[in-house]
Structures are given as structure tokens and as C-alpha cells.
Image (cartoon, helix red, strand yellow):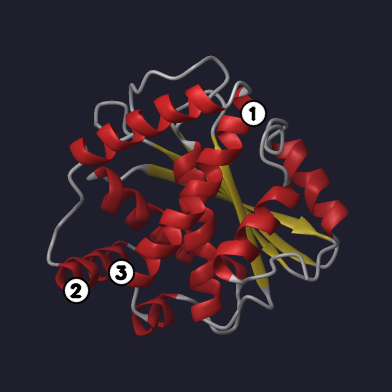
């Protein structure tokens, strides 16, 4: 795991020419964006939905420019063994956070058995001692700047699955954590019934679809990336 993580990070750094993104500029831009959304939208829910949508747009652009198909193929298991997919989820999740925050987060993976196949729950927690471009940004009550990150993860995962030609096998959704700085997301084996998936996600994370619904995610991913996660 550690060797794969270091190898992929080195590959991305070499291809982009930069070790990490500097957080100051995106932090300023996000602050301006939030101020503009507060001016235009009165509902915290609508602001969160818009942040998630913008994150999907931004995440799709970043993933296409940074990820090489051959690199993804080396760390994704062609036999879809769930333990190896969990390794991919951890490597991919940590690398993405490092590139945009400049530090490795902690990440926990939980394998969940469903009726037609597995689901994986990934919880990413930012190091509270470190800066990120969303940390300490002032926002209205009920608004989470981390929706930009959840949208970006959702897009990046959808594109990775398409590049790997496994988007007919897996789909993924991500949201901000409710009580910590970080994200929670799920990889879902596509044969599982959607209603069962929603039930288990809401059991694990009751707030998950409160502001951005599954239908919202499907619509945004379809619109910006052309991937239909629910069919």
C-alpha cells in the first residue's frame, strides 16, 4: 500500500511539475464564490447543491489533466476483488487530498455486504493541524464549503471508473462529513438495487442525502461527464 501510494504520487508530481497546489489562491477564490452565492441564493441547501455541482465540474477537469490511464490500471484490480478495490479507494482518496491540501489525511475503509455485491465506505479526515483551502472559511449556518470537495471526488471517481472501463461495474457518491473536516463516500457494485443502496448509505450516514440527493449527483455527473451512474 505505502509503495503504491508513493509511486503514484511521484508519477503525478512528475507529470504536473508541481508537488502540491498552493492553498492560498483556491482559498481566496472559494471565499469569493461563497460570497457571490450568498448574494444570489437564500437557502443553505441551494448553496450546498451549487458548491457540489461546481466541485464536479472542477474535479473532472483536474482528473483529466493529472491522471494517466496506465497509472490507474496498475493499482485497480482487474478481478474486482473487494479487498483490492478497497486499497484502490484508499490510495486514490489520499492522493487526491494530498494534491489539493498538501498533506496526507487519515482514511478508513469499511466493506459492506449487500444483496448483489459489495459496497465500500471511505471516510477521509483532514489533519486538524494542517491547512486546506476550505479550512476556517466563514460560511452561513448550514453551508459546508466541503461540498466543493465532495463534488470533485465524485467527478474524479466517475472519470477514473470510465478510464478503467469499469463504470458498468462500479459507481460512487461522496459528501462532506457532518461533524469533522473531511469527506465520506461510497463505492457501489452496480448490480445492487438502488433502493437498497440508499437505505444502507442513510443507515451509515443519515445526513448523506439531506442537501444533495442521489438524483442530484446522477444529474450533475451525467451533465458534466456523460456518465450515467444509475443505469
Residue 162 percent coordinates (x, y): 55, 77
Q: Residue furthest front?
A: 40
Q: Nearer the viewer, mark 1 or mark 2?
A: 1
Q: Earlier in the sequence, mark 1 or mark 2?
A: 2
Q: Is residue 229 above or below residue 109?
A: below
- Residue indicated by mark 3: 66
Q: Nearer the viewer, mark 3 or mark 1?
A: 1
Q: Earlier in the sequence, mark 3 or mark 1?
A: 1
Depth check: give the residue in front, 209 or 227: 227
Residue 225 percent coordinates (x, y): 55, 68
- Evaluate whether residue 129 shows in this view: yes
Q: Secondary structure at mark 3?
A: helix
- Residue indicated by mark 1: 45
Q: Quadrant of the C terminus?
A: bottom right
Q: Whole-Å distance between the Cαs marked 3 and 2?
A: 7 Å
Q: Are marks 3 and 2 in contact (CB under 8 Å)?
A: yes
Q: Image quarter for residue 66? A: bottom left
Residue 32 percent coordinates (x, y): 34, 30
Q: Image quarter for residue 5? A: bottom left
Residue 36 percent coordinates (x, y): 43, 29
- Residue indicated by mark 2: 15
Q: Whole-Å distance between the Cαs marked 3 and 1?
A: 31 Å
Amino acid at each position: 500500500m505505502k509503495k503504491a501510494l508513493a509511486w503514484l504520487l511521484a508519477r503525478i508530481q512528475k507529470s504536473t511539475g508541481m508537488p502540491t497546489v498552493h492553498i492560498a489562491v483556491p482559498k481566496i477564490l472559494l471565499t469569493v464564490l461563497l460570497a457571490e452565492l450568498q448574494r444570489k441564493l437564500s437557502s443553505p441547501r441551494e448553496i450546498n447543491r451549487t458548491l457540489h455541482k461546481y466541485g464536479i465540474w472542477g474535479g473532472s477537469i483536474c482528473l483529466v489533466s493529472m491522471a494517466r490511464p496506465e497509472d490507474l490500471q496498475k493499482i485497480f484490480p482487474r478481478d474486482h476483488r473487494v479487498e483490492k478495490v478497497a486499497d484502490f479507494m484508499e490510495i486514490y482518496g489520499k492522493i487526491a487530498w494530498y494534491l489539493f491540501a498538501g498533506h496526507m489525511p487519515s482514511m478508513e475503509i469499511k466493506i459492506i455486504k449487500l444483496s448483489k455485491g459489495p459496497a465500500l465506505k471511505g471516510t477521509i479526515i483532514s489533519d486538524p493541524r494542517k491547512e486546506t483551502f476550505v479550512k476556517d472559511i466563514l460560511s452561513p449556518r448550514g453551508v459546508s464549503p466541503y461540498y466543493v470537495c465532495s463534488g470533485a471526488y465524485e467527478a474524479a471517481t466517475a472519470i477514473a471508473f470510465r478510464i478503467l472501463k469499469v463504470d458498468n461495474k462500479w459507481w460512487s457518491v461522496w459528501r462532506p462529513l457532518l461533524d469533522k473536516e473531511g469527506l465520506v463516500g461510497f463505492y457501489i457494485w452496480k448490480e445492487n438495487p438502488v433502493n437498497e443502496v440508499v437505505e444502507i448509505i442513510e443507515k451509515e450516514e443519515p445526513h448523506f442525502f439531506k442537501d444533495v440527493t442521489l438524483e442530484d449527483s446522477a444529474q450533475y455527473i451525467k451533465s458534466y461527464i456523460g456518465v450515467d451512474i444509475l443505469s
